[in-house]
Amino acid sequence: LTFLGIESSCDDTAAAIVTGDRRILASVVTGQAALHEDFGGVVPEIAARAHAERLDYAVEQALADAGVSLRQLSGVAVTAGPGLIGGVMAGVMCAKGIAAGAGLPLVGVNHLAGHALTPRLTDGVDFPYLMLLVSGGHCQFLRVDGPEGFTRLGGTIDDAPGEAFDKLAKLLALPQPGGPSVEAEARHGDPGRFELPRPLLDRPGCDMSFSGLKTAALRQRDQLIAQQGGLRQQDRADLCAAFQNAVAEVLAEKSRRALARSPAPLLAVAGGVAANGTIRAALEHVAAQAGARFLAPPLRLCTDNGAMIAWAGIERFRLGHRDGMDLAARPRWPLDDRAAPMLGGGK
Ligand code: ATP
Ligand code: FE
């Protein structure tokens, strides 16, 4: 099997060629950070337009990199949701055009399933496993029992951790994306100087909250500014270290609970926040304590990419899934809803 995978649900235009025996023949990812930086966030309309302009090139480049022609493909997989609807529509239309033009099967894929199945692509792991998805837009625990067997054990009730890192960076006038700059600052910071809360740790279950942490950091910052008339280099570093530790502790404790509630031989992470060394180390420790293996796929496959979509398409295809020209783009698509969205199907 050889699949083309197309991803355009947020601000990365991506296309990849992946085989049924887990080889990534090509993976093209074009970010749009520069297009959105003046606006302090992804502007859906700009994103959709950029996807529409770039998808053809991304697909062409992926085919060229892989040295594969359309007629050598076995199918086309595309993110059909959840995500920013304009971008998802651009991807779905592109995939339909290719599938119809080349007479190839079309498979609609859930973006979150793409992330969740990545450990199968990178390491060929078996079911079941526990997945912590932590990115700029998502934060949830998933128990993965099969290519379509997802159970959500809990997740954030407000911000995702990546978003919280980005907002903290903004508060401290550090460069975006915030995750890497906060981590760099935290390296020479003292995590014990500022006391930040550990939201929802006092409540049972795997739900999390991160917006209160950011508010607490804001209060500390304003107090410092009022006292000293500004922020010193060391203040920034100490606040970043305290913040990073708080996020790591919450993620670790909730992972411990998820593993206790739903034991699995493997804890895997995906999403951009999985790049954080402190968070990784904390999760690895929790997994070891629970007797589970810990797996973090390479970062380029942890963040949005086409390879995970091609792979999730292959897994769905193997279960017999085919979508028609009535495949619809859907802004919301809960992972436990197995059917691909269809035009005229409401929502
Ligand atoms: P999605 O739609 O999947 O949520 P996204 O673009 O919001 O996609 P990713 O690309 O997976 O998310 O990850 C980006 C996020 O990861 C940003 O919020 C960024 O700050 C965060 N991040 C990146 N590196 C680090 C790091 N070293 N520490 C903490 N956070 C990080
Ligand atoms: Fe994503």
Image (cartoon, rainbow, N blue to C red):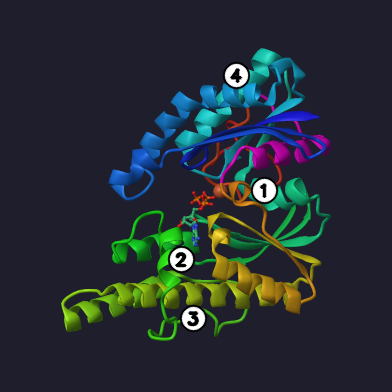
Task: Look at the numbered discs 3 and 4 and tell me whether their residues touch, using CB distance below 8 Å.
Answer: no
Q: Residue furthest left?
A: 229
Q: Earlier in the sequence, mark 2 or mark 4?
A: 4
Q: Are marks 4 and 1 in contact (CB under 8 Å)?
A: no
Work out which quarter of the rendered image holds the C terminus and state it: top right
SS category of the residue bearing label 1: helix
Q: Quadrant of the N terminus?
A: top right
Label 2 or label 3, whichever lies nearer to me, is 2
The span from disc 3 to disc 1 (Cα, nearest Å) is: 29 Å
**Amino acid at pointer 3:** Arg
Mark 2 vs mark 3: which is more N-terminal? 2
Residue ID for mark 1: 113
Label 3: which secondary element: loop
Q: Nearer the viewer, mark 2 or mark 4?
A: 2
User: Start and end of the magenta stretch?
Assistant: 304-324
From the Cβ of disc 2, is ligand 1 less than 8 Å away? yes
- Using the numbered discs, state the Cα–Cα distance from disc 3 to disc 4 in whole angstroms: 49 Å
- Looking at the image, which is closer to me, 155 or 288? 288
Name the residue tied to disc 2.
183
Give SS at disc 2. Answer: helix
